[in-house]
Amino acid sequence: MSKAVNYFFLAVGIIMVSFGLWLIFNPRTTLSIVVVLMGIVLLLNGISEIISYVSERKTWSISVWYLFDGLLSTIFGLLVLFNGQVGKNFLILLFAIWILASAIFRILLAFSVKSVSNWFIILIVGVLGLIVGIVSLFNSIFVSVALAVVLGGFFIFQGLTCIFISSFLRRNH
């Protein structure tokens, strides 16, 4: 591999680690970024579904429900882009519901494996998840921080991987 590729991996790694740290230390901005990206994706998806319906409805016999789905995605995408609070509230609610559902499933799992030793650990994790889910419903800052840590951690992990690859390439070539 050339030195350019090596330096590219190193640069990308440093940028990703830096971005990950920035996300973690700016949770409110992280939530706003995710909401804008969600709005853009919904808008583009909606437009593509509308175009697909209009241009291909006779060829594919596409249902009118496909058009309605495209219209709904477009409207919601525009709503999220022009009123970020709607998107933030939706994302917070979605996050809280996901945590609550996961916690309930853990609690149910715990009771179904009562014959296994240490089953209560699953129950404790489920109850803690239930508490986190309920707190998430009423505390947007908590969700912002959690989202920032998850996304930031992902970018840090990916960046460190790129730095490791750069180091590996430098040593082996």
Image (spheres, rainbow, N blue to C red):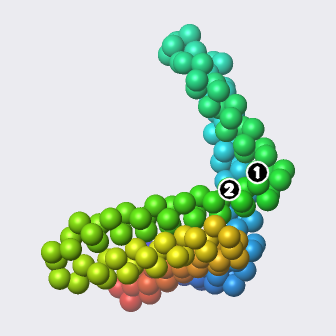
What mark, if any, has residue 33 been given in the picture?
none
Is 19 on the left or on the right of 120, as rendered?
Answer: right
Residue type, label 1: Val
Q: On the rendered image, what quadrant is the C terminus found in?
A: bottom left
What mark, if any, has residue 80 been given in the picture?
1
Is 125 on the left or on the right of 81, as rendered?
Answer: left
Q: How many marks?
A: 2
Q: On the rendered image, what quadrant is the N terminus found in?
A: bottom left
Residue type, label 2: Phe
x and y percentages locating residue 129 in the rendered image: 47, 74
x and y percentages locating residue 154 in the rendered image: 52, 74
Query: Which residue appears at 32% of the width and 65% of the height?
Result: 108
**Label 1: element kind:** helix
Residue occupied by mark 2: 90
Around disc 2, counting alpha carbons within 10 Å, would you say few (fewer than 14), some (14 to 19), or many (20 or more)? some
Query: Which residue appears at 54% of the width and 60% of the height?
Result: 97
Q: Quadrant of residue 88?
A: bottom right
